């Protein structure tokens, strides 16, 4: 068993779609980034890569590489899943939190869990996603950006 921790943050801007956990959220702003800037998926990927001892997403998918320009983070997560499998590990569980004043995440959390579980080839019960506000404190509270934290436990495949 190994554990990894992931964190990501992106600025909210006009003119971009808001994608979190592989789910499109209807909102008048989106997250700025080289890819689709999906903070939750990025945090989960970083947690998995950390548990594997393989660095972070910047090492594997640098923002200087045009192959990743505007790419879906779900496509990147599929690559991380391949790395997980080739290392003979699978997801034990994931616990994550999205930090955003707006929009409200609750209506979309189930879809996020479903989307991530499908890609990571695990049961829905192995993924828990929460959301919180900062009571208007900090950059999230001022609606300048959204952050996400994730912790993952990976386990060896049973023989």
Image (spheres, grey):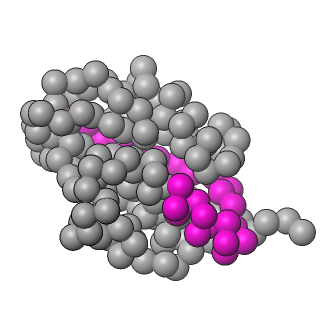
Q: To which quarter of the image does residue 69 belong?
A: bottom left
List x then y, in percent, for residue 137: 14, 40
Foreground residue among 90 and 138: 90
Q: Is residue 90 left or right of residue 157?
A: left
Q: Is residue 91 left or right of residue 61?
A: right
List x then y, in percent, for residue 141: 16, 37
List x then y, in percent, for residue 142: 10, 37
Examine the rendered structure and indicate whether residue 48 appears above or below residue 103.
below
List x then y, in percent, for residue 30: 20, 36
Is residue 135 in view from this perspective? no
Q: Is residue 72 magenta?
A: no
Foreground residue among 102 and 71: 71
On-image quarter of the C terminus: bottom right
Is residue 77 in view from this perspective? yes
Numbered range of the magenta stretch: 78-101
Q: Is residue 90 magenta?
A: yes
Q: Residue furthest right?
A: 159
Rendered residue at 22%/28% (across/down): 102
Q: How many marks?
A: 0
Rendered residue at 30%/41% (across/down): 99
Q: Is residue 109 left or right of residue 157?
A: left
Q: Is residue 113 left or right of residue 100?
A: right
Rendered residue at 51%/28% (across/down): 111
Foreground residue among 28 and 93: 28
Examine the rendered structure and indicate whether residue 43 appears above or below residue 38.
below
Q: To which quarter of the image does residue 87 belong?
A: bottom right
On-image quarter of the N terminus: bottom right
């Amino acid at each position: 068993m190994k554990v990894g921790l992931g964190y990501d943050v992106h600025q909210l801007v006009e003119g971009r779609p808001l994608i979190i956990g592989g789910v499109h959220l209807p909102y008048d702003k989106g997250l700025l980034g080289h890819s689709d800037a999906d903070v939750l998926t990025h945090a989960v990927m970083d947690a998995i890569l950390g548990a594997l001892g393989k660095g972070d997403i910047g090492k594997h998918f640098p923002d200087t590489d045009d192959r990743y320009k505007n790419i879906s983070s779900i496509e990147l997560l599929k690559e991380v899943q391949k790395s997980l499998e080739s290392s003979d590990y699978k997801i034990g569980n994931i616990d994550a939190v999205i930090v955003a004043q707006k929009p409200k995440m609750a209506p979309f959390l189930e879809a996020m869990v479903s989307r991530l579980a499908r890609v990571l080839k695990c049961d829905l019960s192995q993924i828990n996603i929460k959301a919180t506000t900062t009571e208007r404190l900090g950059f999230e509270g001022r609606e300048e950006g959204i952050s996400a934290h994730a912790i993952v436990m990976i386990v060896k495949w049973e023989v």
